[in-house]
Image: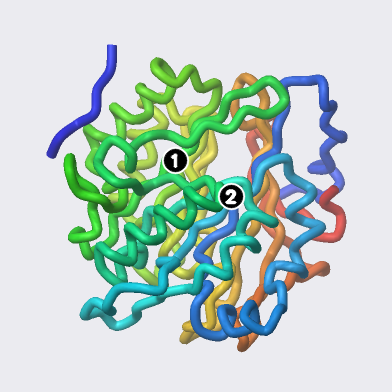
Amino acid sequence: MTILTCSLFFPASAQTLAPISQTSKQVSILFVGDMVLDDLPGKAIEQGIDPFSAFEKIFHSADIRVGNLECVIATTGKATEKNFTFRAHPRVIPLLKKHFDAISIANNHSGDYGPAAFNEMLTLLTEQKMPYFGGGNNLNEAHRPHIIEKNGLRIALLGYDEFMPRSFEANVNKAGVAWSEDEQVVADIKRARQQYRADIVIPFMHWGWENEMTANKRQRELARLMIDAGADAVVGGHPHVIQDTETYQGKPIIYSIGNFMIDAVDNEAQTLGWAIRLHIDQHGVKAWDTRMAKINTEGIPSPIPEANSACWSKKTGVLGTCKNAELK
């Protein structure tokens, strides 16, 4: 493996956060989980429907919006031998640009239609100026952080897959996704700090086992390794269900935020996901809150206004619940 180197609960009212001053070094960044823009959501888009519209106000409550693109965007390629393969039409890109500031392509479906389709997706995203991370034309590009500057802060986003098939992995001269080799991940986080001068570093992970409601040993060990290497928070997905959270060294680890847009579900837990919003200053994540998403039979999410959902404040160090309707 080539490594890149370089020289419990409290009232919702207690979680209400004051409006962020545009002149201060404070930023809110929102993450959503797996988005499959193929099948029924893809057909809705083809018909002129915006499947993200129910969450538009919630998206606008954050300064930066990020999601995991759980499919390849292409018109070429041949489906690989897998249980599920997802390929979305290029018509979805304008909607991604409308709602997201960046997308991760580090997952086990980016390579579903082979190298030609993956390369087409990279070209399409680049041409249409849709920022992405967690994949690229080679190892260096796949592991390069995506930098977003907002309100005086430089935020580095890194994306990693560690769910098979590993044949989708980028290498020195091969396009693909970023794989989460421990040494490489540590080097990437340090490079984001030193070479890219990032104030904040957040890995967005694709890991864990499907339908497990709690994170496994590997997830926990890798998350702590990333925090020790300098990450300010870790956000994860792939299990298709919401998993537990923890705080390590005062920094949040969100193991899985569940699905966000997908019609290939086989149990009730897979129809629920979080839109999680991190509130950040120059010292790291000071709080986070969540909005619950319910995915309908068409694979399209809507918020559940009456739901109680997880939230956390570094000031108290306590994990609690907030009412969705009370989040500002």
Q: Residue at x 36, y 23 (%)?
A: 191
Q: Can you see residue 188?
A: yes
Q: Residue at x 34, y 46 (%)?
A: 136
Name the amino acid type tagged 1. Pro
Q: Is residue 116 left or right of residue 95?
A: left
The local secondary structure at tag 2 comes to strand
**Looking at the image, residue 123 lies above or below residue 233:** below
The mark lying in front, picked from 2 and 1, is 2
Q: Residue at x 24, y 28 (%)?
A: 4
Q: How many marks?
A: 2
Decide which of 190, 266 is in the foreground and name it: 190
x then y, percent, for residue 316: 70, 32
The local secondary structure at tag 1 comes to strand
Residue 309 occupies which quadrant of the picture? bottom right
Lower position in the chain sequence, tag 2 or tag 1: 2
Name the amino acid type tagged 2. Val
Residue occupied by mark 1: 203
Decide which of 31, 70 is in the foreground and name it: 70
**Looking at the image, residue 135 lies above or below residue 35:** above
x then y, percent, for residue 133: 44, 45
Q: Quadrant of the N terminus?
A: top left
Residue occupied by mark 2: 66
Q: Is residue 232 left or right of residue 114?
A: right
Q: Looking at this view, name the residue that lies furthest to the front.
A: 127
x then y, percent, for residue 146: 48, 36
Q: Can you see residue 208?
A: no
Q: Looking at this view, name the residue that lies furthest to the top.
A: 7
Q: Is residue 253 left or right of residue 11?
A: left
Q: CA distance from mark 2 to mark 1?
A: 12 Å
Q: Residue at x 53, y 67 (%)?
A: 35
